Image (tube, helix red, strand yellow):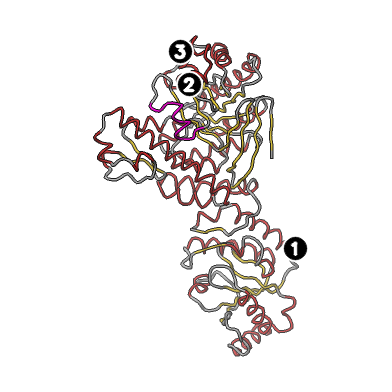
């Protein structure tokens, strides 16, 4: 898929959930996404742009045009931003809106900052929007309206055609305003869109709210536009942002955390003073010990910690990309969600958007899926199969006799399916030809035997000690499906503890029969039980 505007083109190569690997091409540069743009303050460099390029492989960064103008002024215009930073990769210039949010205002108007950005010639620029921050609804509405007004004004002020401009989306935690802002900005000629004001949410670990903000934005913008998430750069949460459809990130956290002696990992943040070991294989951590880092002066210690923090963040981006290529981004979310209760809460919040995630996720994969627990019930593959199963069962003639087989977890074997059919034939006699045979396949629920080879039924790896929540949910869905058909239900079980776990209580109406569904020769096996039950049903 390839999407293009006059200033930029966006091409998607791989997808999983809403995450995607793609290429963003401007008039002069091309980068792979998802990617992190390290924030560079040229007045206070803990790592130089040249180091980012040569030692870290960074191909894109972001700097603040407002701060560059205040510090370098005419020098920046004469050299251009690439020469000033000594960086040949893609450069994004922010407008100073964050400083306005932090300090209340800045001493520049939009025309001045846009003219300066065009004069220093970045690859991508940002208009001077008005961040919503933590505003109440009335103030948030004003920030949205003013940002849209400035977006229209910027279109008229722009002169260069070789700079791709970012259209910021405001509204903060007010989802109605956020959706409106996203729709309005999508109507305007901005090839890259950006979700603004998430920093105050992330600083307070309100990741569930961040999920709402990102999904609301994605629901209201075209998939042809890459989405930038301002201020996001901690490795523990990047997989969630990518899985929800964010393509670009910028952050100064790698440096800011370093100045505070904080050590970033994919599982959270550690304080250097509490560390005895450096649990990382990056160049900084393999050449130093925790004691050595503690003994350094503040500037050198910050430099080395910033180096580690950036390595850890870039490594997480690579892990996310590999997970997308393998179709295992959901499994990565499962693991990352256990790093902090707030991330687990965010992961569970994905269930609210299961339908949206399913509609925009790849429809098939070449490998199986791992089921870890009840949160996995909302993964797109399971949601999609259940929707298709619901449509499939609507076409079944009703009422009819349904023979339901319970079996141990995992893929039903050929022996199971053959023996199950033989049991059903012996059990029902001539009426077998009019019966519907189904198997209970957790976590999917009841599945017609003829669909057992359909993805993902035969490709779910699941624990034999399944949790009660998953069983309850699968039984609940099964009863819903069976009720739509209208049926006489006969349940046949192999008598295993797993099967009894499914059948306990009054979950299933009708008679229950125990048979060895894995015995090669079942002729005569529990024949008396079959005959007695058949007589009971016939009468």
Q: Give the image location of residue 523, x and y in percent.
A: 63, 88
SS state under label 1: loop
Q: Earlier in the sequence, mark 2 or mark 1?
A: 2
Task: Rate crowding at label 2 as few (under 14), some (14 to 19) or many (20 or more) other CA atoms within 10 Å.
Answer: some
Q: Magenta segment: does it hold 386?
A: no
Q: Quadrant of residue 221?
A: top right
Q: Whole-percent x and y of residue 206?
A: 44, 38
Q: Nearer the viewer, residue 333 or 297?
A: 297
Please report contact status of discs 1 and 3: CB closer than 8 Å, yes or no. no
| Relative image position of residue 27 (x, y in whole percent) | 64, 25
Q: Nearer the viewer, residue 409 or 14?
A: 14
Judged left or right of residue 234, residue 7 is: right
**Location of mark 2 (residue):** 85
User: Predominant secondary structure in magenta?
Assistant: helix
Q: Residue at x 26, y 36 (%)?
A: 294
Disc 3 on helix, strand or loop? loop
Relative to 222, does residue 479 appear above or below in the rendering? below
What is the C-alpha distance between the residues marked 2 and 1? 65 Å
Give the extent of the magenta segment: 46-58
First in sequence, mark 1 or 3: give its number. 3
Residue at the disc numbered 3: 72
* Label 2 secondary element: helix
Around disc 3, counting alpha carbons within 10 Å, would you say few (fewer than 14), some (14 to 19), or many (20 or more)?
A: some
The mark found on residue 395 in the picture is 1
Q: How many marks?
A: 3
Question: Image quadrant of residue 14?
Answer: top right
- Mark 1–mark 3 Cα distance, whole angstroms, equals 71 Å
Residue 195: assigned label = none
The answer to whether 135 is drawn above or below residue 494 in the figure is above
């Amino acid at each position: 898929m390839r999407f293009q505007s006059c200033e930029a083109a966006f091409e998607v190569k791989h997808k999983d959930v809403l995450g995607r690997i793609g290429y963003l091409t401007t008039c002069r540069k091309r980068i792979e996404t998802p990617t992190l743009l390290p924030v560079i303050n040229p007045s206070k460099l803990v790592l130089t742009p040249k180091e980012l390029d040569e030692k870290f492989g960074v191909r894109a960064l972001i700097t603040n045009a407002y701060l560059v103008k205040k510090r370098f002024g005419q020098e920046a215009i004469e050299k251009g931003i690439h020469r000033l930073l000594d960086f040949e990769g893609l450069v994004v210039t922010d407008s100073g809106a964050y400083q306005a949010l932090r300090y209340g205002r800045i001493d520049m108007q939009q025309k001045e900052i846009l003219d300066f950005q065009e004069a220093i010639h970045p690859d991508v620029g940002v208009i001077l929007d008005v961040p919503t921050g933590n505003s109440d609804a009335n103030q948030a509405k004003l920030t949205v309206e003013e940002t849209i007004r400035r977006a229209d004004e910027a279109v008229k002020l722009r002169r260069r055609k070789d700079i791709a401009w970012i259209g910021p989306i405001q509204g903060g935690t007010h989802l109605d305003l956020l959706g409106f802002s996203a729709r309005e900005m999508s109507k305007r000629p901005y090839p890259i869109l950006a979700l603004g004001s998430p920093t105050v949410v992330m600083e307070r670990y309100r990741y569930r709210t961040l999920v709402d903000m990102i999904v609301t934005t994605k629901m209201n913008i075209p998939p042809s536009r890459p989405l930038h998430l301002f201020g996001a750069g901690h490795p523990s949460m990047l997989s969630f942002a990518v899985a929800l459809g964010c393509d670009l990130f910028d952050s100064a956290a790698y440096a800011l955390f370093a100045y505070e002696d904080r050590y970033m990992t994919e599982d959270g943040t550690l304080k250097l003073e509490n560390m005895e070991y450096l649990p990382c294989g990056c160049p900084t951590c393999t050449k130093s010990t925790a004691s050595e880092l503690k003994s350094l002066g503040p500037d050198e210690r910050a430099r080395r910690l910033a180096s580690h923090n950036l390595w850890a963040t870039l490594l997480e981006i690579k892990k996310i990309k590999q997970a997308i290529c393998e179709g295992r981004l959901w499994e990565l979310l499962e693991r990352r969600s256990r790093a902090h209760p707030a991330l687990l809460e965010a992961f569970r919040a994905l269930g609210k958007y299961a339908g949206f995630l399913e509609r925009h996720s790849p429809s098939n994969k070449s490998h199986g899926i791992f089921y870890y627990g009840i949160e996995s019930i909302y993964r797109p593959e399971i949601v999609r199969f259940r929707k298709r199963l619901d449509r499939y069962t609507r076409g079944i003639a009703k009422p009819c006799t349904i023979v339901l087989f319970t079996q141990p977890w995992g893929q039903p074997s050929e022996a199971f399916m053959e023996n199950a059919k033989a049991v059903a034939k012996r059990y029902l006699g001539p009426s077998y030809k009019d019966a519907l045979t189904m198997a209970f396949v957790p976590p999917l629920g009841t599945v017609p035997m003829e669909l057992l080879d359909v993805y993902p039924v035969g490709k779910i790896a699941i624990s034999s000690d399944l949790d009660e929540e998953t069983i309850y949910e699968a039984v609940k869905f099964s009863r819903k499906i069976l009720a739509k058909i209208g049926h006489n239900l006969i349940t046949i079980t192999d008598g295993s503890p797993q099967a009894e776990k499914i059948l306990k209580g009054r979950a299933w109406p009708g008679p229950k029969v125990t048979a060895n569904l894995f015995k090669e020769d079942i002729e005569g096996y529990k024949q008396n039980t079959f005959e007695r039950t058949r007589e009971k049903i016939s009468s």
